[in-house]
Image (cartoon, grey):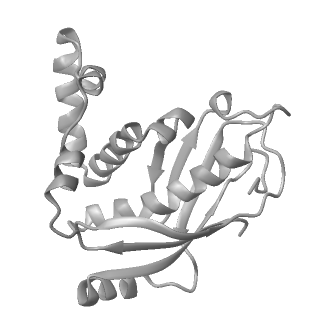
Amino acid sequence: AGGGAGRTAASTPQTNPTKAETVASTSALEQLRTTPAPASRAAAKQGSDRVESNPVEAALAQLAAHCRRMPPVAAIGARPLGYDGRVLRLGAPLSANVNDKGCAFGGSLCGLMTLAGWGWITLRLQLLGIEAEVYVADSQVKYIAPLYDDLVAEAMPAAEEAFESFLEALDRYGKARIAMQARTPMPAGGESA
């Protein structure tokens, strides 16, 4: 399929108190934004009970929260749309990612596809209870056609890569690489990138 998210790597986290403190701390403004109003706390509790009973929904909610904490990702409005066990789908509104031609900005398309590849690995490791630092080591993209609708990126491992081999390498060596592929489908069919 079209563009690619490139190679994603992961390694088991090293002991680094500064890093752990940075990840664990949030700003007061972010805490205010994510704390439900008193009238909606009961509804939020009911919603969180549903999420906790479904590990995929819980992992997607954590991925969404993680996206909101990264300023560039929050700026493009990236959010998880779903995960079916094979493909992670992320979305972002065209209104936050429009270029001077009135279509999706190429950098936003590339960024969303890269984020989807990273998010796929992050989500799968979380579902397996594996803590690891995931990062993108290499990326390539090919733009195919302009997109005049909201952005959607779909990511999955490249066909020739086996996730089990990735997990075995991560377990054995404490680090691993996997090639991912991503695409941005168009509503009428085909791909934008």
Q: Does 153 appear above or below 179?
A: above
| Residue 125 x/y as whole percent | 30, 67
Q: Residue at x 31, y 65 (%)?
A: 133
Picture layout, residue 154 above or below residue 12 = above
Residue 120, image quadrant: bottom left
Residue 22 as seen in the image, left or right of residue 137: left
Q: Where does the image place residue 77, in percent across and percent down from the top left?
A: 53, 34
User: 101 left or right of 80?
Assistant: right
Looking at the picture, how far across and down is residue 167, in whole percent?
A: 32, 82
Q: Residue at the location (78% across, 43% down)? A: 147
Which residue occupies the foreground of this view, 102 or 82? 102
The image quadrant of residue 71 is top left
Give the residue displayed 79% in from the left and 58% down from the top. Answer: 143
Residue 83: x %, y % from top left:
44, 55
Q: Is residue 138 above or below residue 120?
A: below
Q: Name the quadrant of the N terminus.
A: bottom right
